[in-house]
Image: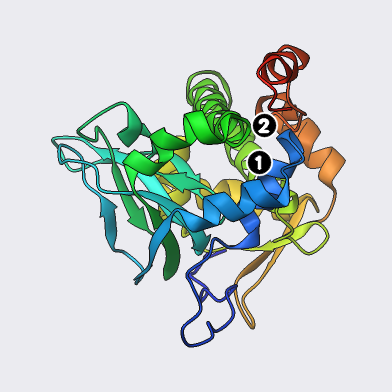
Amino acid sequence: MVLGKPQSGCSGPRIAGERPAISPFLFRKLAVFARLLPEETAFLNSLVSSEGHAPADHHLVRCGEDYGPVLVVNDGWAVRYRTLADGSRQIANFILPGDFIGLNATVMAVSDYDVASITPMTFSRIRVEDIIGMIERHPRMCAAIFWCNAREESILFEHLTSLGRRTAYERVAHLLVELLRRLQLIDLAEGDSFVMPLTQQLIADSVGLTAIHVNRMMRSLENEGLISYSRHPVPRIYIRDVRRLEAAAGFEDGYLHFTEMPRRTRQALTSVGME
């Protein structure tokens, strides 16, 4: 089984003169945490300074360099990673539509990781100063953005657990279920299938295996009837038995935090008249 790169294409054409706006994917994700008011989403859209485009295999953030503006991914996939002195690469996580890139710029000047596009991408740029200014003007929206950052930390910790304690078979199975659940949350999966832009080398760099080993694990999952794969019109993974794949991976979705705003957070916002 050889995984390829599909073409990106979730964003429709923009009307001439129309103000750049964030795609619905971010707001679909944030809706899990809080029911945002129209004025809150409108305010976040008002902060967009411009829209950017990037081809596949393009650097968006470079390790050791100053952060630029915060980016919201509207379309396409990216990867966050570190490269070692010998040229090997460890992927920390995959960045999907609706995710932020560079939120750390609000508290750090220089990046300690690289971010590069996997597919062609579009994204919205927001100035770091405007993200910080939102703390006072729209603290509920700020809490939702903090949730995004905390959720990413949980995903990174789960990936560390996979690298340290799961078998090769479990690591690959776990990653496939995680991607399905994340894409289902933003309505970018079709049932239990999704477009798969990851090469076996990208998967290998994520789960700490060789591409050959990943190929063997994918074939095992396919032979056991847990997944199947098609290449046309774009590469797509089909999860044939989600429950069995979750059991094979030891997957529990608590770390993805599909949960509403905690009560204490709601109470704190209510005390300042914001909830």
Residue ID at (60%, 72%): 10
Mark 1 or 2 closer to N-term? 1
- Circle 1 sits on which residue? 178
Look at label 1 and name its amino acid: Glu
Q: Of tags 1 and 2, which is closer to the observer?
A: 2
Quadrant of the drawing holding the C terminus: top right
Tell me which corner region of the image, top left, top right, bottom left or bottom right, holds residue 122: bottom left
Horizontal side of 44 relative to 79 (left or right) equals: right
Relative depth, front residue between 200 and 130: 130
How far separated are the C-alphas under marks 1 and 2?
8 Å
Q: Are the two marked residues, 1 and 2, in contact with CB atoms closer than 8 angstroms? A: yes
Image position of 39 with respect to 207: above or below: below
Quadrant of the drawing holding the N terminus: bottom right
Residue 256 badge: 2
From the top left corner, tell me how far across and down residue 88 is, in percent: 24, 41
Relative depth, front residue between 25 and 176: 25
Horizontal side of 89 relative to 164 (left or right) equals: left
Residue ID at (56%, 50%): 43
